[in-house]
Image: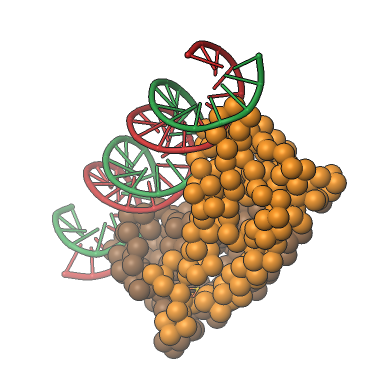
Chain colours: A brown, B orange, C red, D green
Amino acid sequence: MFSKACQYGLKASIYIATISYDGKRVSLKEIAKEIDSPEAFTAKILQDLVRHNIIKSVKGAYGGFEIPKNEISTIKLSQIVNAIDGDNIYRGCGLGLHVCDEEHPCPVHDQFKAVRTQLKNMLENTNLEQLALDIKSGVSFLKL
Amino acid sequence: MFSKACQYGLKASIYIATISYDGKRVSLKEIAKEIDSPEAFTAKILQDLVRHNIIKSVKGAYGGFEIPKNEISTIKLSQIVNAIDGDNIYRGCGLGLHVCDEEHPCPVHDQFKAVRTQLKNMLENTNLEQLALDIKSGVSFLKL
DNA sequence: GTTAATTCGGATAAAATTATCCTATTTATA
DNA sequence: TATAAATAGGATAATTTTATCCGAATTAAC
Ligand code: FES
Ligand code: FES
C-alpha cells in the first residue's frame, strides 16, 4: 500500500508531533530509535518532508526536528503520503492503465475507485494531532 | 497498491477469461499484446498462476492458457492477488508494524483497517466472469 | 519422424527501492 | 575561538522488483 519510505515518514511525523506537542524538539537519532527505522534512510525522508514544509529542522547542537505547535492539528496524513509516494494512490488506476478515466475505464474501475476514495478521505480527515495524542496516552504504538 | 506483477496477473486472467468464455485458448504472445505487458515477465506470472491452479496451461503447438468455462465465475480477484502479492494487503499493518493487532495497534489502525476491509470485500466479491463480460461488451478496457 | 509453435524453467540483467557511509555545514555552549 | 552535537547532501552499496534471454520439453500437424 505505502512504500517503506512513506511508512517511516508517517511514523516519524507522528512521533515528532508527540514531542512538539510538549514544545520540545527531537533528534534524528531518537526518532529512528522510537520508530525502529534505519537512521540514515530516515534522514533522507525527513529532509524531504522539510523541503515540503511539513516539518521543520534546526541545524547544529541542540537542533533537531519539530512541528510548530499550532500546525500539528492542520497537517493531514494525505500531505505526508503525497510528499513521499506522490498521488498515484489517489489518482492512479488499480490495474496500472496510464490514466484512470471514466471514459476508458479498466475492468475494476468502479470497485477500485470506491476503495481509493475511502482511502483518500481517510488520509484527508486524519491529522497529526489526533494520532499524537493516542501515542502519548499509550493507546497506540509506533514500533514492534 | 498492487505490484506490477499483480496488475499483469489480474489483467491477463481477465483476458484469458474473455477468450475461455468462447471455449478458446490463448497464447502468451497474444495475452501480452492485449494487456500491453512485457512477454517474458508475463510468462513468469502466468506460470505462477498455473501452479496456484487458477489458470490452466497447455504446452506445445496450439497450446496456450485457458480457464475451464465453468470455473470462470468462481475465480475471485482475491485469489489472484493472494497468489502473486501474498496476504499482506489483507492482514498487514499500514504503517509496517510486524503484526496488525488490536492489542497493540499502530496510530492509524482503526482507519486503515476499514479501508483494508473494504478492499478485501471488493476483491472477494468480484469474479472473473463479471469483468470478462464487460471487456467483451466494450464497456471496459485492458490497455492504454 | 520432422517441424513448428508453444509453455517451462534457469540464468542473467536492468531498474527501482531501501539502506549505509562519509564529509560539509551549522550552531549552541564552554 | 574551539568543541561538540546536530542536520544536509553526495556517493555508494544492498536488496527487491521488474524485465530479458535462451535452451529444454511438449505437442499438434504435416
Ligand atoms: S481506470 Fe482502472 S481504476 Fe480507474
Ligand atoms: S496495527 Fe497498523 S493497521 Fe493494524
Q: Residue at x 48, y 68 (%)?
A: B92
x and y percentages locating residue B61 in the rendered image: 59, 27
Q: Residue at x 61, y 72 (%)?
A: B117
Side of B134 relative to B66 (left or right): right
- The structure residue drawn at horizontal position 48% and vertical position 63%, both measured from the top left corner, is B88
Where residue C24 appears, as percent x and y from the top left, is: 29, 42
Query: Percent position (x, y) of residue A139?
Result: 45, 86
Q: Examine the rendering and report whether any part of residue B38 can be seen.
A: no
> As displayed, is residue B31 above or below residue B95?
above
Of residues B142 and A30, the one nearer the viewer is B142
Asked if residue A40 lies left or right of residue A135, the reply is left
Compared to B44, does A10 lie above or below?
below
Measured from the top left, where is residue B83 in percent x and y? 52, 55
Residue B114 appears in view = yes
Q: Is residue B59 above or below residue B118?
A: above
Residue at the (69%, 66%) spot, across then down: B125
Task: Tell me which corner region of the image, top left, top right, bottom left or bottom right, holds residue C14.
Answer: top left
